Amino acid sequence: MAHITLGPGSEFDLVRALLARWGTLAEGTGDDAAIVDVPAGEKLVVSTDSSVEFVHFKREWLTAQEIGYRAAASAVSDLAAMGATPLGMTVAMTLPDAWRPQALELADGMAELARATGMRIIGGDLTSGATLTITVTVLGAARSEQLLRRDGAVAGQVVFVTGRFGGPGAAVRALSRDETPAAEHRQRFAHPVPRIREAIWLAAEGATAAVDCSDGLVADAAHLAAASDRRLVLDLDQLTLVDGVTEVEGASSGEEYELVVTGPASLDTDRFAREFGVPLTAVGRVEIAPATGPDVIVLYDGRVITPPTGHDHFRT
Amino acid sequence: MAHITLGPGSEFDLVRALLARWGTLAEGTGDDAAIVDVPAGEKLVVSTDSSVEFVHFKREWLTAQEIGYRAAASAVSDLAAMGATPLGMTVAMTLPDAWRPQALELADGMAELARATGMRIIGGDLTSGATLTITVTVLGAARSEQLLRRDGAVAGQVVFVTGRFGGPGAAVRALSRDETPAAEHRQRFAHPVPRIREAIWLAAEGATAAVDCSDGLVADAAHLAAASDRRLVLDLDQLTLVDGVTEVEGASSGEEYELVVTGPASLDTDRFAREFGVPLTAVGRVEIAPATGPDVIVLYDGRVITPPTGHDHFRT
C-alpha cells in the first residue's frame, strides 16, 4: 500500500518529507492508526522508550543520525530482551525549531535501525516543543513458550551475558571530560546493536529469562533477580570487556543494550560466537532466594564486593 | 498476574508509586515489554500521540488530572476513528522536577480514561527532563471489514459528525484572554470523550470511513477527502453546536475528538442519539474528486465560503 495522502499544512509538509525519506519502510502510514497483523498463535509484545535531550544524550556527543538510531535501538532492545521478533515501531517526536534542519538526519538513524532489524515504521506523531524528545514504541511477536520473561530465572541455571562490556560508560566518561573516546568505546556508545537474533537463538536453546543492560549489568541483574525471586551470583572476573576498562567499570556501564540471560550450563557459547560474531559469556549462577540479604552477590578478584550501581534518571 | 517486582532506586520508587495508584489497571507491567493477546482473526490497530506542555496545554488551564486524562483521551480517540476496540495503552512520560508532586494526579487522569474505555495500562517509560511530555501509545483490535479507514469514503455517501462542536475552541479563546470559559465549553475542552462505542456501532451500521477531529472539523475532513481521493461538501448550517459559538467557530475548533464519518444516508441518527446520548448529525456529502479545485467545499448560509483553517503546530 502506498502512503495515504496527507492534507495541507506545514506540519504535514514535514511529515511528508519524513515519509518520503523513509520510503517503503513507512508504507501504509497516514491513517489515524496503523494496522498490524500479529502472526496466528503468537503473543503481541509491546514496549515504549523515550530519549530526551540533556537526559539521555547531548547534542555535541553524537550526530543527529546516531541520536535517531540510538532512540530506536534502545526500544528495540526491549524486544530482544523478551525473545520477540520485531513487527514494527511508532515514532513520537518533539522537534524544537533548532532541530528542524536535522529532522531528516534523525529520521535516517531510525531508518538505519529499522532496516537492520527488519522493522517497518508504522506510525507516529510529530510536534513542536522546547526539548528534543523521541519516544519509540516497538511491537513484536513471539510464541508464548519462547518468551524470555524477567521473572523466568530458575535456581541452578547459569547467568550469561552477550557482548563486551564497558564501552558506553568509557565513552561517556571521556566525552564528559571533553576528551575523544577510543573508537571502540564510541562505537559501542553511538551504535548499540539490539540482540534480536541472538535472543531468539537463546530462547530456542533453553534460556528462560532475560533483561537488557540499559541501567548497567549489576543493576539490571538485580531487576531480574527481584522479578524472579532468585539470587544471582555474578563473578566479574569472568566478564568479557572492551579494551581499557576495569571489571567494575564494565559491570556498571549503562546503555550497553547487551542481554543478561539465564539458561542451562550446556548453552554452546562457541557456537553462539561463531553464529553472531559476539561473545556469549557465563558470568554467574542463579540460586534460591535468601531469607534475608541482597538479590545479587558480586564477586571480584575472588571476594564479595559492594555491587557497583547503575544509572538512575531520578537519583538526587 | 501481580506486578512484577521492580529493583531498587528512586526512579523505580516513583514507578512503584504510579503502579500502586493504578492498581489492577496496570497488572502485569514491569517486564522489558508487555505481552498482549490480540483476538484471533482481528487486526491489531496502533496509534501514538504526544501531549507537550506549552504546545498542547498550559498548566494554568487544567488540573493535573485533566492533563493526564486528555493525553490518554487524544490517543484513544485514534482507535475510535478506526472503529477499533481498545486493548491497552503504554505511557511514556517526561516528568520535570516541578511536576513530581503532581505525578499521581496525572496518573489518576490516565486511569480515569483507561477505566472509561475498558483499557489496561500495559507499560511505560518514566524519565526526568525539562518539559512535561506525555506520549500515549494505544493498542486496539478490529476485524478487517469493520475498520473505518481514512481512505474509505465513497461518492454518494453522507458525511456525519458525532457530538456538538465549538466547545474546546471557545474554552481556549476565553482562557487565552484570562477569562473563565462557560462550563459547557470548559468541560468539552478538559474532558473530551473518545467515541469508541459510537464508532463500533457506526461501522456495524455501514459507515466506511472516519477521522477524529483533532485539528478541527474542516481540516480533518480535508484529510479524509485527500486520503479517499473524494470531494467532501460540508454545510455548516447543519452543524450541531454548543451554546454560544458560531458555525465557523465550530468548524475550526480543534481538539474536539468527535468523529467525522462517511456512511449511508440511512444511518439512524435518532437511534444513535438515544443509544449514546450525543447527536449524530448529517453535515454534508461525498462526491467524486474534481479534476481541479479543493477537496473540501464549505457551504455557510447558502453560499460557498473559504474553509476555516485548523490547528497546525508547525505553522509559522
Image: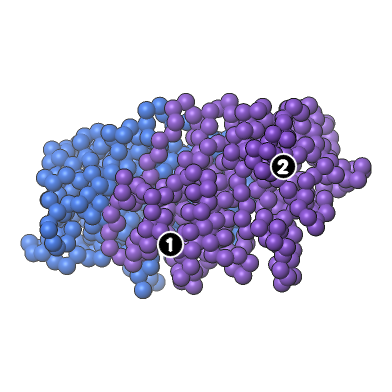
Chain colours: A purple, B blue
- Crowdedness of circle 1 by 10 Å Cα count: few (<14), some, many (20+)? many
Q: Where, by quadrant of the figure, is residue A63 drawn?
A: bottom right
**What amino acid is labelled 2 in the image?**
Pro
**What amino acid is labelled 1 in the image?**
Thr
> In this picture, is B234 found above or below A262?
below
Left or right: B239, with B23 as reference point: left
Of residue B216 and residue A101, the one placed in the foreground of this image is A101
Q: Which residue is mark 1?
A: A127
What is the chain identity of the residue bearing mark 2? A
Badge 1 element:
strand
Q: Residue furthest left?
A: B302
Q: Which residue is mark 2?
A: A279
Badge 2 element:
loop
Image x and y of residue A52, in percent = 57, 60
Q: Residue at 65% x, 33% y: name it.
A: A202
Q: Residue at 65% x, 28% y: name it.
A: A205
Q: Residue at 47% x, 26% y: name it.
A: A41
Image x and y of residue A159, in percent = 75, 35
- Is residue B36 at least partly visible in the picture? no
- Is residue A180 at least partly visible in the picture? yes
Left or right: B164, with B237 as reference point: right
Image x and y of residue A264, in percent = 73, 27
> In this picture, is A281 found above or below B286?
above
Image x and y of residue B70, in percent = 43, 53
The mark closer to the camera, 2 or 1, is: 2
